[in-house]
Image: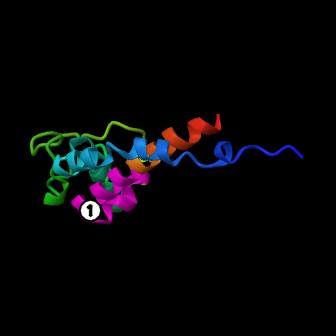
Amino acid sequence: MDQQPHAQTCFPWSAYLICLTPFPLLAYLGLESYGIDYRAFYLAGKAVLQGLDPYLNHIAVSSDFYGPVNAELAYYSGWKYPPLSSYLFAPFALLPYEISKAIFIFSFFLYNSFRSCCCDSLL
């Protein structure tokens, strides 16, 4: 019976740790920034939850729809994606903005670190 050496079958934890090394710095920068791109995602999810068009500026409806992308005088919001994708951000819009942004950033980094460390070794 041909057995592989233990070193080849183990999970490469050192590679995973190397992938996670920049995470604290990037997380800090992401959480301390305003997140202008994420604000558009968040506002689109909030618009969907309230039955509004995610492409239009709804600052007149509520001050919660304010964002630097859609200033008070702009007719359109900062949403430039297909309509169905705004439904993906509706669960994030149920939370306060800062908590929602933190969860989004954490899940983004977790997914990318897993993908770069684990999936490359499977190919």
Q: Position of residue 39 (x, y in %)?
A: 24, 48
Residue located 9% across and 41% down the image: 73
In the rendered structure, the answer to whether residue 81 lies left or right of residue 8 reads: left
In the image, 82 versus 60, the foreground residue is 82
Q: Residues within 10 Å of mark 1 (few under 14, many from 20)?
A: few
Image-quadrant location for residue 98: bottom left
In the image, 13 versus 94, the foreground residue is 13
Residue located 13% across and 58% down the image: 63
In the image, 31 versus 87, the foreground residue is 31
Say what secondary structure mark 1 lies in.
Answer: helix
Circle 1 sits on which residue?
99
In the rendered structure, the answer to whether residue 119 lies left or right of residue 54 reads: right
Q: Position of residue 9 (x, y in %)?
A: 68, 46
In the rendered structure, the answer to whether residue 1 lies left or right of residue 63 reads: right
Q: Position of residue 60 (x, y in %)?
A: 14, 55
Q: Position of residue 5 (x, y in %)?
A: 72, 44
Q: Callout 1, which amino acid?
A: Ile
Predominant secondary structure in magenta? helix
Asked if residue 46 can be seen in this view, the reply is no
Q: Residue 63: say if magenta.
A: no
Residue located 57% across and 35% down the image: 120
Q: How many marks?
A: 1
Asked if residue 13 can be seen in this view, the reply is yes
Which residues fall within the magenta stretch?
Answer: 88-107
In the rendered structure, the answer to whether residue 9 lies left or right of residue 24 reads: right
Q: Residue 93: say if magenta.
A: yes
